Image (cartoon, rainbow, N blue to C red):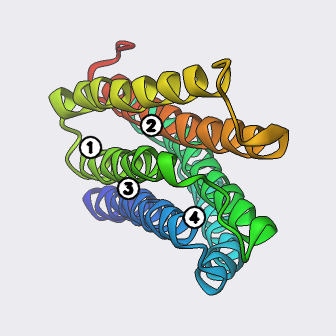
Amino acid sequence: MALIRSVFQDELDSVSQSLVDLCEKVAGTIQKATQSLLTSDLRLAEEIISSDIAIDDFQHDLDARIIDIVARQQPVASDLRALATALRMSADLERMGDLAHHIAKVTRIRHPQSAIPAEFYLMFESLGQAAEKIARKTAVVINTRNTEMALEVEKDDDEIDDLHRQLITALVAPNWKHGVETAVDLTLLGRYYERYADHAVSVSRRVFFLVTGKFA
């Protein structure tokens, strides 16, 4: 019985590590997607767009492993909660990869021109840095199950929400001079970063629930 439990625990640990790995992957993609956006780097944008398939495959494989564990081990109580939570977290992380992919596609569509006017460069640089930071902190939360850090992620999201509000204010200002097409691009881009961070917050909240049995 002890050996069976040991094997089961190894499988649970493997699932947790895969979630950490997936989180690190999507943190890397948002960093590169932002770089491609700021530099109009088509090669880098294409790399991010292509890599989304690998992220999807990684998530599908992880979900299949979780379902297989549930079928074979028939876990109960905290173990079942951990596996069910892992399925939800993997979906959030995969969506974060999709959003980085969407950002890279805007770079590709507008290439060789820049998708963002020069005066918005620093704002999107800050959005990219904040998004990468929140994703990397989320990876630590998954790995350590640190509930205090999990709550910090939600506070970190405030920075992205504030930047998003600043962007919307600029877009609806009467002195907007960049036309409808650019306004649409920036609206979508701002939404992509805002949703990316929201999914990271969702993952951190799920870790908090997993550890405490309470919703943050």
Q: Quadrant of residue 12?
A: bottom left
Q: Which of 120 and 66 is in front in this view?
A: 120
Q: Which of marks 3 and 4 is nearer the N terminus?
A: 3
Residue type, numbered disc 2:
Val
Q: Name the residue under label 1.
A: 141
Q: Name the residue under label 2.
A: 203
Q: Does dot 2 land on a helix, a strand or a loop?
A: helix
Q: Quadrant of residue 79?
A: top left
User: In which quadrant will I find the N terminus?
Assistant: bottom left
Q: Mark 4 points at which residue?
A: 37
Residue 203 visible? The answer is yes
Q: Quadrant of residue 176?
A: top right
Q: Distance between the residues labelled 4 and 1?
A: 28 Å
**Going by the image, does 215 lie left or right of 111?**
left
Q: Which residue is drawn at 54% across and 50% down?
A: 93
Q: Residue at x 29, y 65 (%)?
A: 3
Q: Does dot 4 land on a helix, a strand or a loop?
A: helix
Q: Does dot 3 land on a helix, a strand or a loop?
A: helix
**Going by the image, does 180 lie left or right of 16?**
right
User: In which quadrant will I find the C terminus?
Assistant: top left
Q: Nearer the viewer, residue 36 or 153?
A: 36
Q: Does dot 1 land on a helix, a strand or a loop?
A: helix
Q: Name the residue under label 3.
A: 16
Q: How far apart are marks 3 and 4 (CA)?
A: 32 Å
Q: Which of 150 and 192 is in front in this view?
A: 192
Rendered location of residue 141, percent (x, y): 26, 43
